[in-house]
Image (spheres, helix red, strand yellow):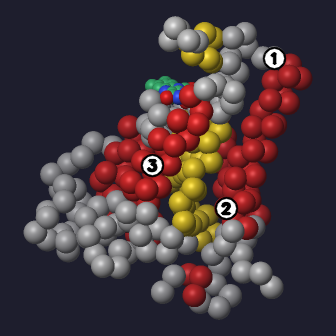
Amino acid sequence: MSNNDAPNARRTALVVVSHHRPDSLTAHIGNRTVRQLESEGYAVDLLDLNAEGYDPRMTVADQPDWGDRDKVYSADTEAQMRRILAADIVVVAFPVYWMGPPALLKGWIDRVWNYGFAYGRSKPRLAGKRILWLALAGATADDDIVPAMTEALDAQLSAGIAYYCGFSDSRVGLLPDAEERPQRLDAEGNLSIGDAIAGDAKAAHFLEFEAKAAGFVEEFLASDRVPA
Ligand SMILES: Cc1cc2nc3c(=O)[nH]c(=O)nc-3n(C[C@H](O)[C@H](O)[C@H](O)COP(=O)(O)O)c2cc1C
């Protein structure tokens, strides 16, 4: 039974932050998301992978055994699994690296979203959960790469991972313009780095950025609300 099924139960969220710098924009967006979810009444578990010293390297203990879907994985992985199980919804904040998640986050998925737990059963244990991927990208919003980036992230994270693991809803909130020095790839493939924005323009830029992230979260939460 999920938390949602119990009358008056407090809904639960797992917020995963994948960044190596606590002062990064990614961490900032992750922390804001925690506050936003709490103000919506969620009990939030913040999993800051870097702060918790998460090791993304696959290990023998966490490698699937295709002959045993009831394999008991490493203690760390089993503990991570319990954190996912306890959550009605999952929100992940990460920087886009090469059109995909950074290695830290990818390794967490590889090791924890494992055979017998996340997939490989007629009813996966993650079935019915919902997930939002907040993907911060250095590209500017008007960069020609943005539609392809959105498609690539959606194919990998939603179709390839979340729906494969039984999530009932997975959406990618792409947040371009994550850099204060705009990055653009020109027709010849050169990366041009623009001037850093500063002062009021910078404050306005990041306010808009935060509002966009908050909007993705709001939309995600609203889509689960049953109309009165
Ligand atoms: C290894 C690496 C790969 C990157 N790949 C992409 C990319 O494919 N597309 C993109 O828009 N930005 C890319 N970026 C830029 C990051 O997405 C951007 O720096 C980050 O989202 C900024 O947020 P932060 O300050 O929290 O790190 C890349 C950056 C690094 C370091």
| Tag 2 secondary structure | helix
User: As displayed, is residue 204 above or below residue 9?
Assistant: above
Contact check, label 2 and label 1, Cβ < 8 Å: no
- Cβ of disc 3 within 8 Å of ligand 1? no
The residue that appears at 59% across and 82% down in the rendered structure is 4
User: How would you rate the neighbour count of disc 1 (Cα within 10 Å): few for under 14, some for 14-19, many for 20 or more?
Assistant: few
Q: Which residue sits furthest bottom?
A: 7
The residue pinned by badge 1 equals: 198
User: Residue under circle 3?
Assistant: 155
2 or 1: tag closer to the N-terminus: 1
Q: Is residue 199 left or right of residue 3?
A: right
Q: Which amino acid type corresponds to the residue marked 2 in the rendered image?
A: Phe
Instruction: Quote the CA–CA distance across marks 2 and 1.
Output: 32 Å
At label 1, the amino acid type is: Ala
Residue 130 in view, yes or no: yes
In the foreground, 201 or 142:
142
In this view of the protein, which residue sits in the foreground, 153 or 34? Answer: 153
In percent of width and height, residue 179 lies at 66, 24
Q: Earlier in the sequence, mark 1 or mark 3?
A: 3
Q: Quadrant of residue 209?
A: top right
Q: Residue extending furthest front? A: 187
